[in-house]
Image (spheres, rainbow, N blue to C red):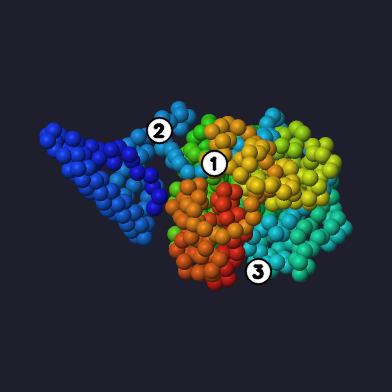
């Protein structure tokens, strides 16, 4: 366990043991004083070690017995937050704040800002690979030339045919693209100028309907694929009753969108979405709130949910980190997660009786001429969104659907990821960096203190995609543990995945992690290991074993 321990206790113990030493008579020899001092230090260290082990064993036992409760410290020693409560902003009220000490903020140029602008986007796509956990060859329900309304089924998973994957917009299907082994990658739609939604029938009344009726409705009208299930971040299984449902209302990734701006004007739909989700779990719907700055009233005044305040550097905004500090996944438990915009889509389905995938997308990065916010729909064409925003010579640019840590590199001819709400454009790093870090060079972001730029916390960078080194021996450095604010040991986990030790993977906490949680560790990795790929390989291994 990596819980922070108070320096006050250590200071008091040191005083207790060392003050008598300096009360010696002048005749006491310096040698005796040194010896006694060393013995006192050894006693203090032994005492602290015993307390630390006892503390950890009590916490582990409370978790094993299932008696662990949020906000209760089952250890012997108090947390530093208990002894030294941080000054809380007024908007938090009487609620406690979970202050995460670990992490690192990457400050990049091209921060989006300003008001939300409309974009003229002609083509959209529903991308099957974005939905983890479905069969590689889903069953198509349309063909090229078909006319569809927003919410009409496009394909379904053969293993669960009741779960429909539906059109994000109305229009004509102009392409069905396939990848390896003819697996469907994209169903491309040329959008109508005036959007039309599928007629909603048999809408359940939330105050009367039971859970199975609501689930059946969500399956039929394409909402279940918007919900992801943990462990493994797969499409939610409608047959599963999640222990809890988690939603993070802020994003700490580089150049991430301000979700307060995203929810502006959609407050009623967001609350309706929360009302729906409350009927899908026997536990609670948790909202992770940002204590660093005052959130939107849509979040702070939300009803029917449990609000938990977080403060810290990235990845404090990751829902996986929040789950770990609220109610960690234990044993065979399943939980569901959603983004704010997915909650709004579900709320619109019930509140306005239409399938609406409107998305507010942050467009940022050093290579974007006018960083800002664009209103569009799910799966929008990147070429249309970036029109007039980037240089014509795109060979020297890296276009990323998502953030620079966990997003996917794409060409301008492709489409925004289903669960992505930002596009980042930075220079392509295809040049050789002679002598690497040995020579003074341009300022680059780094979690290491060896760079002078670490002294300037507010400095923004314009990095490229150079890794500044090649893959090398996977040595134990402790870097990951200093960046990931979770009680897991990611480096040991990664090594277990590489050697295929399934039992050790399970014991080291693979159920609590997805790619975005280890993305910062990959950024800082001295060994240049592809940690996100390694983790996904481990997840596939666990799924194959039925674990």
Task: Please indicate, yes or no, whether residue 361 appears anywhere in the rendered image.
Answer: no
Tell me the SS state at disc 3: loop
Q: Disc 2 vs disc 1: which is toward the camera?
A: 1
Q: CA distance from mark 2 to mark 1?
A: 30 Å
Tell me the SS state at disc 1: loop
Q: Position of residue 317 (x, y in %)?
A: 54, 43
Q: Which residue is mark 1?
A: 450
Q: Which residue is mark 3?
A: 159
Q: Nearer the viewer, residue 363 or 443?
A: 443
Q: Nearer the viewer, residue 423 or 300?
A: 423
Identify the residue at horizontal 31%, vertical 43% (top origin): 78
Q: Position of residue 460 (x, y in %)?
A: 63, 34
Q: Which residue is mark 2?
A: 86
Identify the residue at horizontal 68%, vertical 56% (top origin): 130
- Residue, far bottom: 545
Classify 10 Å Cα crowding around label 2: few (below 14), some (14-19), many (20 and above).
few
Classify 10 Å Cα crowding around label 1: few (below 14), some (14-19), many (20 and above).
few
Identify the residue at horizontal 54%, vertical 69% (top origin): 500
């Amino acid at each position: 366990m990596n819980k922070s321990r108070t320096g006050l206790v250590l200071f008091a113990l040191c005083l207790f043991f060392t003050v008598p030493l300096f009360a010696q008579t002048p005749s006491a020899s310096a040698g005796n004083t040194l010896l006694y001092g060393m013995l006192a230090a050894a006693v203090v260290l032994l005492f602290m070690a015993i307390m630390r082990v006892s503390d950890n064993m009590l916490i582990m036992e409370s978790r094993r017995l299932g008696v662990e409760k949020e906000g209760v410290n089952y250890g012997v020693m108090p947390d530093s937050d208990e002894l030294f409560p941080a000054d809380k902003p007024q908007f938090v009220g009487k609620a406690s704040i979970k202050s995460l000490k670990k992490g690192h903020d990457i400050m990049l140029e091209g921060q989006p800002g300003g008001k939300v602008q409309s974009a003229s986007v002609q083509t959209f796509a529903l991308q099957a690979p974005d939905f983890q956990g479905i069969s590689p060859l889903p069953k198509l329900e349309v063909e090229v030339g078909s006319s569809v309304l927003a919410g009409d089924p496009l394909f379904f998973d053969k293993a669960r045919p009741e779960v429909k994957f539906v059109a994000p917009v109305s229009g004509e299907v102009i392409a069905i693209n396939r990848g390896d082994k003819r697996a469907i990658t994209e169903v491309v739609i040329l959008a109508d100028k005036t959007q039309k939604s599928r007629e909603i029938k048999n809408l359940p009344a939330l105050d009367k309907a039971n859970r199975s009726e609501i689930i059946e409705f969500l399956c039929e009208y394409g909402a279940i694929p918007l919900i992801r299930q943990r462990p493994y971040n797969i499409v939610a299984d409608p047959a599963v009753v999640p222990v809890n449902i988690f939603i993070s209302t802020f994003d700490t990734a580089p150049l991430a969108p301000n979700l307060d701006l995203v929810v502006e004007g959609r407050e009623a739909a967001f609350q309706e979405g929360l009302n729906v989700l409350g009927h899908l779990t026997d536990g609670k719907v948790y909202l992770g709130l940002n204590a660093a700055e005052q959130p939107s009233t849509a979040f702070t005044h939300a009803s029917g949910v449990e609000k938990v305040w977080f403060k810290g550097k990235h990845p404090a905004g990751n829902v996986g980190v929040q789950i770990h500090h609220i109610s960690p996944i234990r044993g065979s438990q399943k939980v569901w997660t959603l983004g704010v915009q997915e909650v709004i889509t579900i709320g619109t389905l019930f509140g306005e009786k239409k399938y609406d995938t409107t998305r507010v997308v942050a467009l940022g990065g050093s290579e974007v001429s006018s960083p800002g916010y664009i209103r569009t729909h799910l799966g929008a064409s990147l070429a249309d969104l970036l029109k007039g925003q980037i240089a014509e010579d795109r060979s020297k640019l890296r276009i990323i659907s998502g953030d620079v840590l966990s997003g996917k590199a794409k060409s301008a001819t492709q489409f925004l990821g289903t669960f992505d709400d930002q596009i980042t454009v930075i220079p392509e790093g295809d040049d050789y960096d002679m002598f690497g870090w040995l020579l003074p060079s341009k300022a680059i972001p780094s979690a290491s203190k060896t760079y002078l730029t670490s002294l300037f916390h507010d400095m923004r960078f314009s990095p490229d995609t150079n890794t500044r080194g090649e893959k090398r021996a996977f040595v134990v450095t402790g870097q990951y543990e200093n960046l990931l604010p979770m009680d897991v040991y990611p480096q040991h986990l990664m090594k277990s995945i590489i050697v295929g030790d399934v039992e050790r993977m399970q014991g080291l906490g693979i159920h609590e992690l997805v790619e975005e949680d280890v993305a910062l560790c990959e950024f800082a990795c001295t060994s240049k290991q592809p940690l996100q790929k390694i983790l996904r390989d481990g997840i596939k291994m666990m799924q194959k074993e039925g674990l």
